[in-house]
Amino acid sequence: MSVPPDPRPFSVSSRDEDAGAAFVLESKGEWWHAGFHLTTAIVGPTILTLPYVFRGLGWALGFLCLTVMGVVTFYSYFLMSKVLEYCEKEGRRHIRFRELAADVLGSGWMFYFVIFIQTAINTGIGIGAILLAGECLQIMYSNISPNGSLKLYEFIAMVTAVMMVLSQLPTFHSLRHINLGSLVLSLGYSLLVVGACINAGVSKNPPRRDYSLESSKSARVFSAFTSISIIAAIFGNGILPEIQATLAPPATGKMVKGLLMCYSVIFITFYSVAVSGYWAFGNQSNSNILKSLLPDNGPSLAPTWVLGLGVIFVLLQLFAIGLVYSQVAYEIMERKSADVKQGLFSMRNLIPRIILRSLYVIFCGFMAAMLPFFGDINGVVGAIGFIPLDFILPMVLYNMTFKPSKSSVTYWVNMTIVVVFTGAGLMGTFSSVRKLVLDANRFKLFSSQVVD
């Protein structure tokens, strides 16, 4: 049986030979850079799904679940940053999620579990970013040329070509200015969408608003758990250790400041989009609220320039999101393919980087064109991927590291979160897969429409 890489801290010499650490995850950032990275990793166009989430939960439960998920994820990421800081003070600075989990839990199987889940999530987000960017181009094209002949997969190919170029930015740290722009863009399109939804709701011919839930009790339960899984995916961030790795050591206290920056943006954007979108469209809310504002039949429900600018902002931010979540794949590839002694831009390292990163982006683009099924897959990813990494593992890692008394509030809060979200993850997985199966007859390979 193969043995995983040593999860214990790298020695100075071995880390010096690790190109994934030295190049992709170089540790030069400040706390605000971590804030930019975190915001790009969490606050993305998936927030435009929140009115659809409320459609499955209703007003009261929607507010409750959104708030609870926000509090729990902030707490979870705070605990993980504390575990990373503790390990660093002990001389065991971890720069990868899989190493942290394997070291604290003392398990080679945990190393494989984390790297499998993390890689699946990151690749899925890379595929989703390309797919949604292609859809943004298609929306703009269809409004400019309603009878145009270009198909969705052709726009996906265009996005893939741009991503291949951007993917050559060599390090996570080199994305800091792009991710600052991403933060501004998220605030921009959120403001535009909120304004558009309010405008639609108070117009002379507002959309019909009905806030009733599914008529069947079982259908309501399944819809609720699917919505919870989507919220988990929206709040999910499976790369916090890698983001913290980009901080110049010592990292103590820096990540908390970055989290506060990120969650300030989350508070502004998440609630405003969820409330305005669900208020305007009720249970007719689409899985992308922009589609509700741009119905297939009938006139646009907002000024064209507002929606056009919003779509452009979303499109630009998707490139940043695709780049951020690709970093784990790049550091895995370049840990062995690059030679740290040759220099970052040497031909020895440049050529493999261009080839491997381009092939990865092409793979993501091909999958996006072949399987344009965004809404249902989002719920599955949240239940299977983000809930274990973001709601369960951090609690376990904290209890294993700091060993709080079993009679302490901290211990029981952590264990309660583990139990509750394990159950929610199982139910969410079942309900999300169920919806995927029920919608399977709508799925067509290389479809020209994104299936919700």
Image: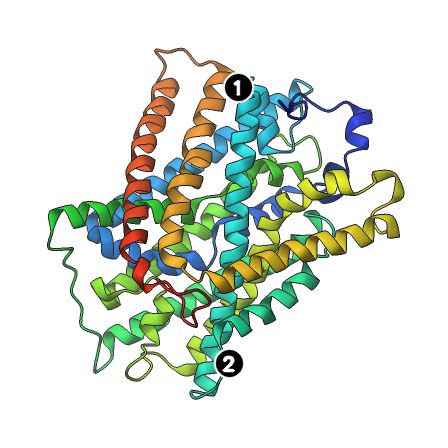
Tell me the amino acid under the disc marked 2.
Leu
Question: Around disc 1, counting alpha carbons within 10 Å, would you say few (fewer than 14), some (14 to 19), or many (20 or more)?
Answer: some
Residue pictured at 32% horizontal, 25% vertical = 416
Marked residue nearer the N-terminal end (2 or 1): 1
Q: How many marks?
A: 2
Nearer to me, 175 or 435: 435
Question: Around disc 2, counting alpha carbons within 10 Å, would you say few (fewer than 14), some (14 to 19), or many (20 or more)?
Answer: few
Residue pictured at 38% horizontal, 82% vertical = 303
Which residue is label 1 attached to? Answer: 105
Nearer to me, 69 or 392: 392
Query: Residue 206 falls in which quadrant of the image?
Result: bottom left
> Where 268 falls versus 207 (above or below)?
above
Secondary structure category for the residue under label 2:
loop
Tell me the amino acid under the disc marked 1.
Leu
Q: How is the image coloured?
A: rainbow
Residue 186 drawn at (x, y percent): 49, 60
Residue 250 drawn at (x, y percent): 69, 30
Quarter of the N terminus within the rendering: top right
Quarter of the C terminus within the rendering: bottom left
Which residue is label 2 attached to? Answer: 150
Secondary structure category for the residue under label 1:
helix
Res. 307 mark:
none
Residue 265 drawn at (x, y percent): 47, 52
